[in-house]
């Protein structure tokens, strides 16, 4: 079996707020489509990487339970301090300051999107 992971889907409460958040992380809106049941799918991707994130808006739903099984998605950045400074200008703050998990490991930190999904930022290099 030849397989490829093509995207992850999150259910969101407010389209513009979520698109702006992921835009601040460097994602671009690739495609938006309305579904027959009134839902809207917004596909987001990092430049040159395709639509890897599907944001699904269902009208009339005010919140979702993220659940205890969800962990996070991870996004790399060349300069974590610069990325965090840019995010701070848009009101996005990390859960705690950057840290490393092991000696010599990459610096990381986590932010949360508008629907409380965790995003790990990993400094490349």
Image: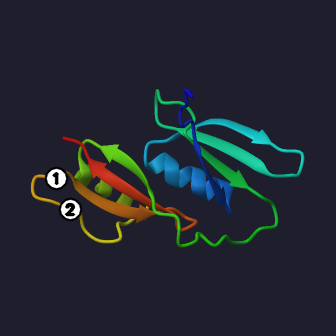
Residue 89's place in the image compared with 96, above or below, is: above
Residue 49's place in the image compared with 40, above or below, is: above
Which residue lies most toward the left here? 103
Tag 1 residue: 105
Position of the N terminus, as image quadrant, is top right
How many numbered dots are placed on residues in this image? 2
Looking at the rendering, which quadrant does residue 100 occupy? bottom left
Find numbered disc 1 in the image and state the secondary structure of the residue it sits on: loop
Q: Residue at x 55, y 64 (%)?
A: 114
| Residue 94 x %, y % | 35, 66
Local crowd size for mark 1, using a 10 Å CA cut-off: few (<14), some (14–19), many (≥20):
few
Q: Residue at x 58, y 71 (%)?
A: 67
User: 54 or 13, which is in the foreground?
Assistant: 54
Inspect this view and state whether residue 57 appears.
yes
Find numbered disc 2 in the image and state the secondary structure of the residue it sits on: loop
| Residue 66 x %, y % | 59, 69
Position of the C terminus, as image quadrant, is top left
| Residue 55 x %, y % | 64, 50
User: 24 or 123, which is in the foreground?
Assistant: 123
Tag 2 residue: 101
Q: Residue at x 51, y 55 (%)?
A: 21
| Residue 119 x %, y % | 43, 58
Looking at the rendering, which quadrant does residue 107 occupy? bottom left
Task: Kindly report the distance in space between the C-alpha atoms of the residues bearing marks 2 and 1.
Answer: 6 Å
Inspect this view and state whether residue 86 appears.
no
Q: Are the two marked residues, 2 and 1, in contact with CB atoms closer than 8 angstroms?
A: yes
Local crowd size for mark 2, using a 10 Å CA cut-off: few (<14), some (14–19), many (≥20):
few
Q: Is residue 73 left or right of residue 51?
A: left
Q: Which numbered dot is residue 61?
A: none
Looking at the rendering, which quadrant does residue 58 occupy? bottom right
Which residue lies most toward the front here? 1
Residue 20's place in the image compared with 45, above or below, is: below
């Amino acid at each position: 079996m030849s397989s490829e992971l093509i995207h992850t889907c999150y259910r969101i409460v407010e389209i513009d707020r979520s698109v702006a958040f992921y835009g601040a992380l460097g994602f671009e809106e690739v495609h938006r489509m309305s579904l027959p049941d009134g839902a809207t799918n917004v596909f987001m991707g990092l430049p040159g990487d395709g639509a890897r994130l599907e944001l699904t808006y269902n009208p009339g739903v005010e919140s979702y339970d993220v659940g205890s099984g969800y962990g996070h998605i991870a996004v790399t950045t060349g300069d974590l301090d610069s990325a965090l400074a840019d995010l701070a200008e848009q009101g996005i703050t990390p859960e705690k300051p950057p840290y490393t998990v092991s000696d010599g490991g990459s610096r990381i930190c986590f932010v949360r999107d508008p629907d409380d999904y965790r995003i790990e930022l990993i400094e490349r290099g």
